[in-house]
Image: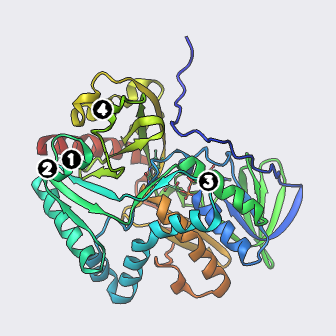
Amino acid sequence: MTAFAPTSAWVEEPAVALPNDPLGANESCDLAIVGAGILGLSSALDAARRGLSVRVIDAATVGDRASGLNGGQVIAGFKYDPDWLVAHFGAKRGEALVNFGATTPDAVYDLIAREGLNVPHQRSGWIQAAHSEVAMRAAEERARQWSARGVAAKILDASEIARLTGARGYIGGWLDPRSGAIQPLAYVRELARVAAAAGVRVAENTRVATLKREIGGWVLQTADDRSLRAKTVIVATNAYADGLIPGLARTLLPLHSFQIATAPLPDSVLSTILPEGQVVSDSRRIIIYYRRGPGGRILFGGRGSTAEPTNPRAWAHLEHALKRLFPALTDVAIEKRWYGRVALTLDHLPHVHEPEPGLLVAAGCQGRGVGLMTALGPRLIDYIVTQDAERIPFPITPIRPIPFHAFRNIGISAAIAWYRLVDMLER
Ligand SMILES: Cc1cc2nc3c(=O)[nH]c(=O)nc-3n(C[C@H](O)[C@H](O)[C@H](O)COP(=O)(O)OP(=O)(O)OC[C@H]3O[C@@H](n4cnc5c(N)ncnc54)[C@H](O)[C@@H]3O)c2cc1C
């Protein structure tokens, strides 16, 4: 019997050949970046365009982690509505956050256009589908707040949402036209390609084991004793944070997001599901998200177990949810199952830290990192170049580990089971 191996639906066509640029025994640069995901690479590209010499180091290969595995939904904003952000952070910081959140999809689509990235993409909007009356009221309020800020947000009634999604059981929702879909693996690989063409040197399969301060900068050391000296360092390891920055991993709840892809659907079925190409997340506490995928497939995702999945049964809850929403898919084969880590924070906002001068750390994408991390990269570089902290929309905060973090898996599993039950009862 062959061992089960999760496989993503994302395939590069054509494959992007990235220059192999292993780290030498003793190198130096202006800016070292740990992590070659969207954040590391969007920062690197921007820094190189501003004339800095940049080294990016990743323990895996480009595209192997969240940035190449995600659902490719490009969603504006944060978990919080604009008015809440302004009330909570005050007019200045709150408006900066609202404006930043509003433009994260622009950052992605402008980058694709400006750099000529070969990335399949579409910008038909994001639907947040309401499964209950309470969720519908929240959707209406969210749409109202964005409309007041000039967004052509649209409230959807039960028949409109049924037509746009093809799904059963929603009572309505709202449509955000700023958002859309990209092919994530192509996006992160293309980012690496243009960054390399701009002079960034990316070393894959190289784990940074230690980071030490020295006069004038930092020394990054790998487990096999190669070293890199840099004036400034960005740590862009998000949910894959290890012990490199003391306490960082304990500020995050690293959850698994699971996805499945159907076999290619016949036109008669496909034409009834997301006919206009929107991407969808629903309002359940244990969120479900879906979209059309390559080759006439439907991609469907949601929270998974905290343990590493070892067999296809770990995705069974998603298959049930898919068939419940789309009865026409009851007998359709599931071709792919895969997963990756997302980083949640307790306050549901990304965190930026500067534990020491010249060392910047950003993490906590809340499962919305495609737009967010693309937009944040150039802001980090702005800050490095200008030292103007207002260039970063989020407050720069100390690293504060979550109390009782060691028990996170027990807490997360219990919370997931509880919220699944509540979601079910609300159906
Ligand atoms: C299944 C799934 C679905 C998702 N769907 C969506 C979606 O539809 N829309 C959306 O906006 N977001 C989505 N997300 C979230 C999104 O993918 C992430 O927010 C985003 O990719 C984070 O990018 P990043 O560059 O910060 O981190 P990552 O892409 O996770 O990159 C971090 C890198 O750091 C490297 N690293 C860690 N430690 C070290 C070390 N010591 N030395 C060297 N390298 C190190 C890792 O190898 C990794 O490559 C999803 C995530 C998952 C997992």
Query: Which comes before the other along the chain, label 2 or label 3?
Result: 3
Q: Which mark is residue 163?
A: 1
Mark 1 lies on a secondary structure that is helix
Q: Say if mark 4 contacts mark 3, CB within 8 Å.
A: no
Amino acid bearing label 1: Arg
Q: CA distance from mark 1 to mark 4?
A: 13 Å
Q: Say if mark 2 contacts mark 1, CB within 8 Å.
A: yes
Amino acid bearing label 2: Ser
Amino acid bearing label 3: Asn
Q: Is residue 314 above or below residue 426?
A: above
Q: Residues within 10 Å of mark 4 (few under 14, many from 20)?
A: few
Q: Quadrant of the N terminus?
A: top right
Q: Is residue 147 above or below residue 204?
A: below
Mark 2 lies on a secondary structure that is helix
Q: CA distance from mark 4 to mark 3?
A: 29 Å
Q: Is residue 389 above or below residue 130?
A: below
Residue wearing tag 2: 159
Mark 3 lies on a secondary structure that is loop
